[in-house]
Image: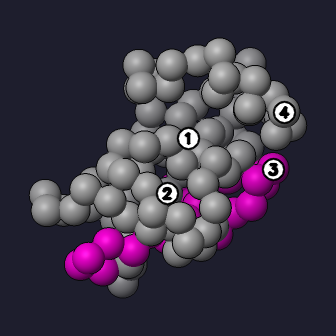
Amino acid sequence: MEFLPIRLPQFSPNDDVGIIVDWAKSSGDFANKGEIICNVETTKSIFDVEAQVTGYLTTVVDPGTEAKVGELIAVITAEPVSNDDVNNWLHRTDTTKIEGTTTGKKVS
């Protein structure tokens, strides 16, 4: 099973952290490419994070949690996976060495 990491995007040059305001999709939900999966608050504004690929979302960071830019916040897989599957993958994988998606845009 391939896990595609979703990392916290850098929305502006001065922001190095963001707070996950809420998840528009829940763990286990199917997300199409381009769908909003969560909202992130920075010092400047609230931004949308979109799915960059189509697949099943598993969130790693709870709403209200502060995350660093580039930090893993979720994963997307082609098939549904259990939380145990994701936790096992996290424990055996150095996620800092796996490229992931980090795209977001300002909420209008």
Label 4 Cα neighbours within 10 Å, binned few <14 / some 14-19 / many ≥20: few
Q: Residue at x 57, y 31 (%)?
A: 4
Q: Residue at x 61, y 69 (%)?
A: 63
Q: Which residue carries the number 4 mark? A: 84
Say whether residue 80 is magenta: no
In what element is the residue under mark 2?
strand
State yes or no: discs 1 and 3 in contact (Cβ < 8 Å): no
Q: CA distance from mark 1 to mark 3?
A: 15 Å
Q: Residues within 10 Å of mark 3 (few under 14, many from 20)?
A: some
Residue beneath label 3, please?
Answer: 28
- Give the labeled residue for mark 2: 50
Residue 2 drawn above or below residue 41: above
In the image, is 25 to the left or to the right of 85?
left
Q: Please say if the residues under marks 2 and 3 sit with CB atoms less than 8 Å apart.
A: no
Left or right of 75 on screen, residue 99: left
Residue range (magenta): 24-45
Q: Which mark is drawn over residue 87?
A: none
Give the CA distance from mark 2 to mark 1: 9 Å
Instruction: Note whether 84 is above or below 74 in the view shown.
Output: above
Query: Mark 2 is on which residue type?
Result: Glu
Quarter of the image where the N terminus is located: top right
Question: Sequence-wise, which precedes: disc 1 or disc 3?
Answer: 3
Q: Is residue 54 visible?
A: no
Check residue 42 for magenta coloring.
yes
C-alpha separation, residue under disc 4 versus residue under disc 3? 13 Å
Q: CA distance from mark 2 to mark 3?
A: 16 Å
CA gap between label 2 and label 4 equals 25 Å
Label 1 element class = loop
> In the rendered image, is residue 13 in sight?
yes
Residue farthest left in this picture = 13
